[in-house]
Amino acid sequence: MGQPVVHWEMWSENPQKVSDFYANVFGWQIRRLPEMDYRFVETGGSGGINGGIVTPKKGPWPAKMTLYIDVDDINAYTDKIRSAGGKMLVPKTEVHGVGWLALFSDPDERLLGVWQKKK
């Protein structure tokens, strides 16, 4: 069995405008988390993937959206990514109380993330 996509993020210079757009068009529920400077997006439905809207602190970023792939050992997967020709762009970073993420680019320079839940 493969590793599923479990989260996405849209990166925006104007997250409130983008949040309002998706809430009005698709009825997504968007909850602002000011302590994280983040907006959590619930897309609804039983098969939907939830995500977030954020303004990155550093740049330039090569994309305005990324997908996060669920892994059981983020360190092992960062090694696999490098071995297969990918580049690590943001090292393993803790999301306090929730888990860890790392961002990478694939051989075509698409930006993606790996995610490991805290157990």
Image (cartoon, rainbow, N blue to C red):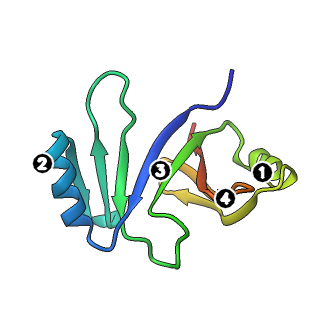
Residue occupying the far left of the picture = 24
Q: Return the residue at label 4.
A: 104
**Amino acid marked by disc 3:** Gly
Looking at the image, the residue that sits furthest to the front is 108
Q: Which amino acid type corresponds to the residue marked 4 in the rendered image?
A: Phe
Q: Earlier in the sequence, mark 3 or mark 4?
A: 3
69 or 119, which lies in front?
A: 69
Q: Residues within 10 Å of mark 3 (few under 14, many from 20)?
A: few
The numbered mark, 3 or 2, whose residue comes first in the sequence reads 2
Left or right, 87 with respect to 48, comes to right
Q: Image point 87% across, 52% down: which residue?
A: 83
Residue under label 2, please give it: 24
Query: What is the C-alpha distance between the residues marked 1 and 3?
Result: 25 Å
CB of mark 4 within 8 Å of CB of mark 1? yes
Check contact, mark 2 vs mark 1: CB within 8 A.
no
For the point 44% across and 47% down, the residue is: 8
The residue identified by callout 3 is: 97
For the residues labelled 3 and 4, the Cα–Cα distance comes to 22 Å
Image position, residue 55 (x, y; %): 37, 70
Residue plotted at (82% across, 47% down): 80
Q: Is residue 3 above or below residue 13?
A: above
Against 57, residue 107 (above or below) is above
- Is label 4 in a helix, a strand or a loop? strand
